Image (cartoon, rainbow, N blue to C red):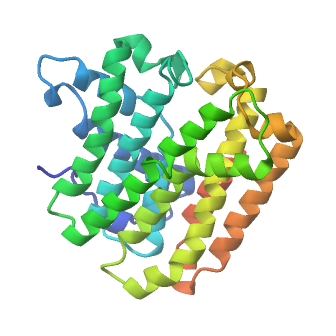
Amino acid sequence: MSSIYPAKTESDERGAAPQGEDFEAWAGRLAARARGLVDRQTGGTLSPGSPLGEAMHYAAALGGKRMRPLLVWATGDCVQAPLEALDAAACAVELMHAYSLVHDDLPCMDNDVLRRGQPTVHVRYGEAMALLAGDALQTRAFEVLSGDEAVPAPLRARLCALLAAAAGAGGMAGGQALDLAATGRQLELAALRDMHARKTGALLRASVLMGLACGAGRDPLLVQDCEPMLLRYAQAVGLAFQVVDDVLDASTDSATLGKTAGKDAAQGKATFVSLLGIETAREQARQLLDEALQALAQLPPAARARSTRLAELARQIVARSF
């Protein structure tokens, strides 16, 4: 397949930041890069004469915080991973995330009509086309990882394995099944954490592990030394993301959220807010942030010095208001 990569700039070698670039500028630059990568993998050219490519593009390229690609790039920066591999991982994980949102919004799942401030894919294109667009986005993610010879074959296989594990029965799909089964019931905290570690946390965790894996060819010992700490960071951040989502669903209006607010309570969903209350849930998120930052503080010095983007992303996840 042709390369997914946009042209490099002087600041693009290993995703390095221009001199003096602050976090907001870095995040904006790489969010735009993620949009460019996704643009190249969706659209009408994929399915001439059919709305499928258009529906894929609508789902994946229009809006979104690009948190998962940012985690890929920030982790890769810790281990000085090459940009070509990080771009493939970042694009694939965003395509997989988009697929999950399309399917989660379907009437047979969460039945939502609003996503990122616009009609959900099944509202815009019909339920059948939304189902197909989600399927195609998921498979496109693996095409991106497996088909570009700029990434060494063993790394392509490793990235595919990480992404598949995050998406399957032990990850997002399994977590969604648990969520459906728990609707209308109150879960114990341990069961709730397990459900969301799969449904939401698995793909965020995979984003970190994929960014880490991209550095194995450059410094395998550093990658090995970093893995336990970065796994702890990813687990904490993944769970914190869902805790904050639950708080926002219960405390923010739909216009601000860009999706239907109050939906969890209306559907009888098991959430951190329904179990703990808003203030205790917020405290849980703060504790998880502390766990994530403590994990980064224990990285080997060479990686710890380059972990500031990961620390800022963790803070942004907990502090976000939409």
Q: How many numbered markers are drawn?
A: 0
Residue at 39% over, 12% down: 124
Q: Looking at the picture, does residue 9 appear above or below residue 37? A: below
Depth order, front residue of 45/203: 203
Is 321 left or right of 168, judged from the image as shown? right
Depth order, front residue of 40/206: 206
Is 153 left or right of 269, judged from the image as shown? left
Residue at 43% over, 48% down: 168
Q: Looking at the picture, does residue 82 appear above or below residue 320? A: below
Quarter of the image where the C terminus is located: top right
Depth order, front residue of 12/278: 278
Point out residue 4 in the picture as x, y percentages from the top left corner.
21, 49
Residue 76 visible at all: no
Point out residue 125 in the picture as x, y percentages from the top left corner.
34, 13
Residue at 35% over, 31% down: 134
Depth order, front residue of 86/27: 86
